[in-house]
Image (spheres, rainbow, N blue to C red):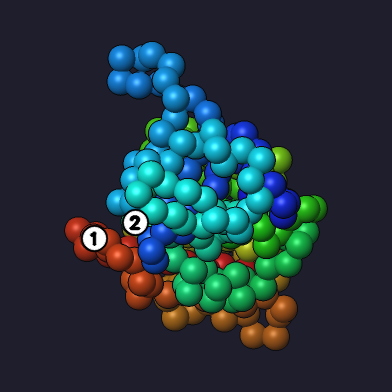
Amino acid sequence: MSFRNYKDKIEEGDTAILYLSNNLYAIDVRPEMKNKKGEIVENVYQTPFGALKVRTLIGANYGSRVELSKGWGHVIQPTPELWSLTLPHRTQIIYTPDISMILLQLDLVPGSIVIEAGTGSGSLTHALIRRVRPHGHVHTFDFHEHRSKVAQEEFQEHGIADFVTAKHRDVLADGFGEELNGKADAVFLDLPSPWIGVPHKFEHWAFGPHSRRTEDPRIGLSTEGHSKEHFYMEGNYTTANQQTDHDPAIALIL
Ligand SMILES: C[S@@+](CC[C@H](N)C(=O)[O-])C[C@H]1O[C@@H](n2cnc3c(N)ncnc32)[C@H](O)[C@@H]1O
């Protein structure tokens, strides 16, 4: 629950970040865990500086020094930025420098309704949630069922599930659902060939009534005098493990 609010002490069920000699590790703060045989055993986290008995974190202050069997580190409360650096990768992800620009360009504020696809590893989603909460909402979609499910579980574990709805859906084929028609303040697409869906599937409700249809979203997303603007960028974001078997692209739609 440690993503929800700032707090002094580590509680069971938190995700805590261990800072150790310039490396960061996300630790699930549970005193016990299941081993490969399915037996319940003490949760001992192995690091280059030896073992950490995870139960010793419970009740410790965030920011405090923790002892390992062969050294020491510091344990800190997670933020979306730290989560992007430590999350289990299920896809390539968007990192903080690009996320900052995306949040700025989308002009998101607390209370905004934002749609995102695909959810991927939830890196951007965590930042979107922090930006729009407490009264806004993130609707995030992925056509990979397992990724969508794992992301939902993480939002639950992190105590932020009430600010996000994660659905399993192919948004280019099926859109975002009638219930979101006209509701979004912004749409963000981080998936291959977003222009396939942009002009045809999303324009009426995502761009809003004042937007003009464009034949080419790369160059034509201007609204001339209207308050909404459209942005488009292609494949220039700084992922450490960017694959180029297709052209990754990002569409920013306001
Ligand atoms: C690069 S990842 C997104 C990473 C995410 N922005 C992050 O920061 O963690 C792209 C995701 O889009 C999903 N995806 C691709 N095409 C899609 C589609 N048509 N509808 C829904 N999801 C799609 C993929 O399954 C993949 O999980």
- Residue annotated with mark 1: 243
Taking depth in this image into account, of 142 and 223 the one nearest to the observer is 142
216 lies above or below 61: below
- Give the answer, above or below, for where 186 lies relative to 149: below
Total of numbered circles in the picture?
2
Could you tell me residue 175's position as x and y percent? 52, 46
Q: For disc 2, does the CB lie below 8 Å from ligand 1?
A: yes
Q: Quadrant of residue 242?
A: bottom left
Residue 5: x %, y % from top left? 73, 51
In the picture, measured across the screen, residue 111 lies left or right of residue 107, that is right
Q: Is residue 210 above or below residue 159?
A: below
Determine the image quadrant of residue 90. Answer: top left
The spot of residue 215 in percent (x, y) is 45, 71
Residue type for callout 2:
Gln
Residue 106 percent across, percent down from the top left: 61, 71
Residues at marks 1 and 2, CA–CA distance in whole angstroms? 8 Å
The label number, if any, that marks residue 149 in the structure image: none
Q: On the rendered image, what quadrant is the N terminus found in?
A: top right
Give the residue drawn at x 36%, y 72%: 238
Residue situated in front as seen by the camera: 93 or 200: 93
Question: Can residue 11 be seen from the camera position used here?
Answer: yes
At mark 1, the secondary structure is loop
The kind of residue tagged 1 is: Gln
Residue linked to disc 2: 92
Residue at x 56% of width, y 67% of height: 253
User: Which of the two discs, 1 and 2, labels the residue nearer the N terminus?
Assistant: 2
Q: Pointers 1 and 2 in contact (CB under 8 A)?
A: yes
Is 45 in front, or is 150?
A: 45
- The outermost residue toward the left is 245
